[in-house]
Amino acid sequence: MSQALITKHQALQIENLVAGYPGRVLVRNLFLCLPAPAFVAVVGHNGSGKTTLFRVLTGQLPYQGSVQLLGQEVRSLRRAAAAGLLGYLPQRGSIDFSVAVRELVVMGRYRHHGLLSAYAPADYALADAALAQVGMAHLAARDFTQLSGGEQQLVWLAQLSLQDAQVYLLDEPTQQLDVYYRRQVFGLVHQWATTQGKTVLCSTHDLDNLPELSGYLLNLSEAEPQLRPISAATVQAARTCLELAPQR
Ligand SMILES: Nc1ncnc2c1ncn2[C@@H]1O[C@H](COP(=O)(O)OP(=O)(O)OP(=O)(O)O)[C@@H](O)[C@H]1O
C-alpha cells in the first residue's frame, strides 16, 4: 500500500451502515469518518454488535450502506488481508494441531513469502522480536496448544503484529489477560497507532486502561454511536451508559 493512498483516504469511512442477521438489525444507520492513523476503543454491552461490526469490516457479513476501508468499498474488496490492508484478531482463535509458538508467530510473515515457501532467518528474528514485545519470548519453543488461554492470546497478537497491515481489528484482545498484561497490551496496540502509523480498532469491556490512551471511543450501546475523543470524561460517560441495562 503506497503512502499516497494512506494519506489520501480516511482509514474508515462508513455511511448509513445497516447490518445484522436475519430478523435482527444490530448496526443501524451508522456514520463514521476515521482518519489514519488512529486508535479506537470499541465498547458496548454484550451483544451490542462489536463483533458484528468487525465481521462487516472484514467482509464476512453483507451490509447496506457504504463501508470504505482506505478508500475501497469493503463489499468489493477481495482478500483484504492479503493486500496488506487489514489484520484481524478474532475473539477466539483456536487451532487443533501441535505447532511450536515460534513457528506460529513467523506465519504472520506469510504475505511477504507465500504460505509454502520457507521463512528466512530474518523472518524468525522478527518473530522473536514480536514475541519479546508481548513478553512471551520464553515460550518460543513450546507447543502452542499447551499454553494457557491468556498466553495463546498474546502469541496471536505477536503473529498479528508481523502482518504489517494498515488497519488492525482486535476483538477483545485482553479478554483472558491478567491485570499486568491487559495494561501491556493496551500500551502495545496503542503504540502501533502512535509510532507505526497504524489504525487500530480494539473492542473491549475493559474501560480501566482507556483514560491514559489517546484516540477515540466508539460506544455501540449509544442510540447513535459516534467517535468521541478519549478522555476521563468520555470514558466515564461510557461507563455510566454501560452500567445501565442495555436498550434492546
Ligand atoms: N450468525 C449469527 N446469527 C444470528 N445472530 C447472531 C449471529 N452472530 C451473532 N449473533 C447475535 O448478534 C448479537 C450481537 O453479537 P456480537 O457478537 O456482534 O456482539 P458483541 O457486541 O461483540 O458482544 P460481546 O461483548 O458479548 O462479545 C448477539 O445477540 C448475537 O447473539
Image (cartoon, rainbow, N blue to C red):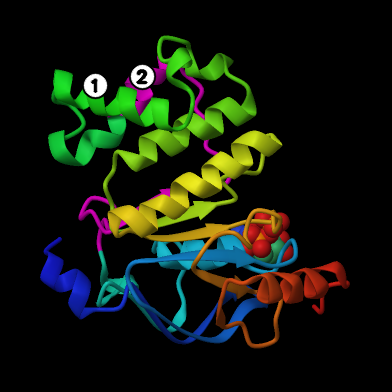
Q: Quadrant of ligand 1?
A: bottom right
Q: Of helix, strand and loop, which one carries label 2?
A: helix
> In whole angstroms, how far apart are the C-alphas of marks 1 and 2?
8 Å
Is-magenta flag for residue 98? yes
Residue 219 visible to an observer of this rendering: yes
Q: Position of residue 241 (x, y in %)?
A: 79, 75
Q: Which residue is label 2 attached to?
A: 102
Name the residue: 72% across, 64% down. Answer: 47
Instruction: Identify which amino acid the numbered label 2 is placed on.
Output: Arg
Q: Tell me if label 1 and label 2 are in contact, CB under 8 Å.
A: yes
Left or right of 3, for residue 225? right
Q: Position of residue 156 (x, y in %)?
A: 46, 34
Q: Which residue is label 1 attached to?
A: 124
The part of the chain drawn in magenta is 78-106
Q: Of helix, strand and loop, which one carries label 1?
A: helix
Q: Quadrant of the C terminus?
A: bottom right
